[in-house]
Image (spheres, grey):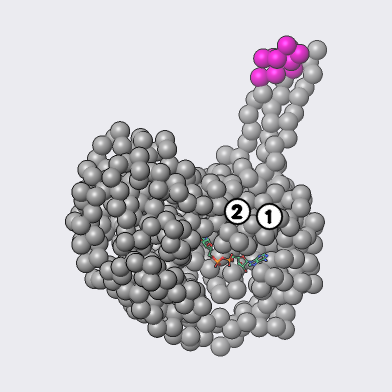
Amino acid sequence: MGFKKLFIDGKWTDTGKYLEVKNPYDGSAAGTVCTADRALTEKAIAAAFNARKVMASLTAKQKGDILDKTGSLIAKYSEDFARIITAEAGKGIVFSRGEAGRTAENFRFAADEARRLGGELIPYDASASGANRFGYYKRFPIGVVGAITPFNFPLNLVAHKVGPAIAAGCPIVLKPASSTPLTAVLLTEVLLEAGLPECGINLVVGSGSVVGNAMVESELINMLTFTGSPSVGLGIKAKAGIKKVTLELGSNSAAVIHEDADIAYAVPKCVVGGFANSGQVCISIQRIYIHEKRYDEFRDMFVKSVKASGFGDPADEKILVGPMIEESEAARVESWIKDAAAKGAKVLTGGGRRGTMLEPTVLEDVDETMTVVSEEAFAPLVCLMKYRTLEEAVERVNNSQFGLQAGIFTNDIKNAFYAIEHMEVGGVMVNDMPTFRVDQMPYGGVKLSGTGREGPRFAVEEMTELKTVMFNLN
Ligand code: NAD
């Protein structure tokens, strides 16, 4: 099998150093890709810096056409993308297909934003000193966008950065996660096939400490858009200097099952929300707060349903839960489960592990003092807890260092509004899992879950600067 080159300074480049990408399910080879060092990363950044004028001068029509065509090509090659995602990320094939479909849509939403990017008239004469003045503000590209992305959605989370950057007129330096670079290589090929100017994207693969750090320290990058773990994100923000930084970080998302909820409706949603992609989703359900009067009913139905969900080879269409990305990650969560059990938690199902395969696990008799509840598991692990009043449930949802999204199942609109008003999160999903996301909605967190919002419209705002214009007609 050949190897994949990096795209640097407008050329596919054999860097002479190679990384073998492994399938996390069975350790088999998923492919080989070149890696960059600090010097090559700096070359890529300098090339992006020199591409600012070309990218800024693309018309709205040109950008919209490139982005629409990218969406169409992703739809055309969706099975190729899905197979690569499953091979390198270990995601169930059905969910990998879903990711490819969403990404095609996501690029079309970015195309819409490219076409509507504009400004607004400023009512200067509302001010005492503004009479006979006319003007507007307009959005301009921020400059070079450095995108650093995680492994768990190797296509769509890259699209959430690349699509808006193109719509905004910014050149991009993209560093995907080292465990999932092959999807990013195919996406770069597709972007070029769709007509993106060759200077518009640079693809660098390598470790966070070398390639990522070179991007963080560069003075030629104007904005870093990062999706990944809170610890890495905080480190990036501390070192980034004057450049703008947006952070999409982790969470231990909660769902509330209120007294009046439709349990049979909520259970399958919570199973998918907790266990799809082995719980390696930033808005995966980790905590479920259940009203005490409905607790036993929910627990019994939920555990039965988790036991019946497919666990195994992600290439099998019946699989909900496959491997975790690395054995060390699965071992970390296994040790948290053992620690919780030693402190009195009951393992209702799962808990066992073989290599990267951590069984889908449900715990009860847990509380917010235990690591399984308070830290981000990013694993197929769900904790069930009882509550008495909605106020208590919302307080416990908020008793977290994170705040990405939360869900509430209720049939009373007053309860829904109480949750909407009082939950400290970036999004409240009523009668759905906190894991719900479509790509055009504003998406991002509060507290340790991050700063800034994604979704093409909102990411384009982050990737542009306002310039204010005034005509003095006096
Ligand atoms: P990670 O933080 O380990 O890695 C993310 C990226 O950062 C990778 O490309 C990595 O190489 C790079 N990196 C690592 N160290 C770096 C450094 N010192 N300087 C610059 N770059 C560096 O995260 P991961 O394990 O790939 O992904 C899991 C995490 O991502 C979870 O915490 C999850 O919640 C979060 N996540 C958040 C969202 C969101 O939208 N909020 C979405 C998906 C994942």
The CA distance from mark 2 to mark 1 is 8 Å
* Depth check, front residue: 416 or 172: 416
Q: Residues within 10 Å of mark 1 (few under 14, many from 20)?
A: some
Where's residue 124, x and y in %? Answer: 70, 18
Seen in the image, is 312 located left or right of residue 296? right
* Residue sitting at x 70%, y 46%: 141
Question: In the image, is 230 to the left or to the right of 313?
Answer: right
**202 or 430, nearer to the observer:** 430
Seen in the picture, residue 77 relative to 242 is either above or below; the reply is below
The spot of residue 305 in percent (x, y) is 24, 65
Q: Residue at x 23, y 44 (%)?
A: 259
Residues drawn in magenta: 123-133
Q: Is residue 415 visible?
A: yes
The residue labelled by disc 1 is 237
User: Residue 317: within the magenta?
Assistant: no
Q: Secondary structure at mark 1?
A: helix
Q: Secondary structure at mark 2?
A: strand
The residue type indicated by label 2 comes to Leu
The reply to whether discs 2 and 1 touch (Cβ–Cβ < 8 Å) is: yes
Residue at image point 24% right, 40% down: 411
* Residue hosting label 2: 247
Q: x, y percentage for residue 60? A: 62, 44
At which x and y percent is residue 53?
77, 51
Residue located at (76% from left, 49% from top): 242
Q: What secondary structure predominates along the stretch shown in magenta?
A: loop
